[in-house]
Image (cartoon, rainbow, N blue to C red):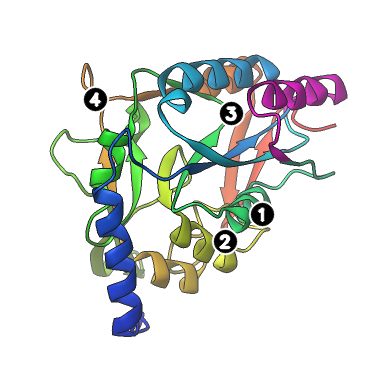
Amino acid sequence: MIFLAVMPQEIIRNQLHRNEKLQLMSSKNHPAIDVTLVCGRRPELLSQTLQSFQQMVFRHFRIGGVYVNIDPFGGDEIDHEKCRSLVLGYFPNAAISEPETASFGRAVKVLWSQVRSPLVLHLEDDWLALESITPDRVFPLFKGRTRAVKLVTKELRWNGRDEIRRRTEKVKLLGLTIWKRKISSFGTSPAFFSGDFARRCSSLLMDDLDPEKQQRSHINPPLMNFTSRYECRVLPGVAQPEIIRDIGRKWRDERGISKITERGRSTWSGRRTTE
């Protein structure tokens, strides 16, 4: 059984008050948001992502800090430089991390530790924005215990009804489920996060494990205990449920690249994944 730490009431009141202030913001009166971007050496994907989000998202917000991690994944040094140039073309003052080895967990941990704004838009390099996303659609969703607003994708398998994203966690013994419960599900696909929430998650993330898989009790209990106190809402599209589209899956399939996860660690199999 997992015991959740009790948060001091003053901390809870302060966090709820910050959320109430976010709700009052409009497209003409809102704080700047930070942007975090996890990417590899895939300029052909990154260029599409940045172009679509500039057209549909970035231009509607005041942008504060921009933090980018370029991992040595998917291409060569020339591709790396192309990605760097693409980022600086849109955000000349972006802080760019360029590690010598690829690590998804470390990338997220480092990026989220740097954010300073009340709200953060977390992105990956292989998504397209399908319609306009504006402050008046995002800020009002940060109410109560909401700490994230997930952008709906086809892969999310949203049922069209639930406003809160949850998953079922099960405990099994000899193959039989002996206990289960519904808990919040955050993940690391594109979403808006509370800055405080992202920084706290960063302090709890283990950089050698997949950041999404860590949000399970048997992988990283302290992280799961923290995130389970809060809620993750969803933001669907107007014309269709999906508001963003994955373009990385086709890229991987064309190259025979697949993701293998074992005990919280994810690796990529196939050709041309690293130098």
Q: Front-most of 267 and 17?
A: 17
Q: Return the residue at label 2.
A: 202
- At label 3, counting other C-alpha atoms closer than 10 Å, the crowd grade (few under 14, some 14-19, many 20 or more) is many
Residue in view at x 44 percent, y 53 percent: 118
Residue 85: percent from left, percent from top: 76, 22
Q: CA distance from mark 3 to mark 2?
A: 20 Å
Residue type (three-letter) at the residue carrying disc 2: Ser
Residue 46: percent from left, percent from top: 62, 22
Mark before the other along the chain sequence, 1 or 4: 1
- At label 2, counting other C-alpha atoms closer than 10 Å, the crowd grade (few under 14, some 14-19, many 20 or more) is many
Q: Is residue 81 left or right of residue 115?
A: right
Q: Which mark is residue 125?
A: 3
**Circle 2: element type:** helix
Mark before the other along the chain sequence, 1 or 2: 1
Location of residue 229 by image quarter: bottom left
Q: CA distance from mark 1 to mark 2?
A: 7 Å
Q: Which residues are magenta?
A: 74-95
Q: CA distance from mark 1 to mark 4?
A: 32 Å
Relative vertical location of residue 249 with respect to residue 107 in this rendering, above or below? above
Q: Which mark is residue 241?
A: 4
Mark before the other along the chain sequence, 4 or 3: 3
| Closer mark to the observer between disc 4 and disc 2 | 2
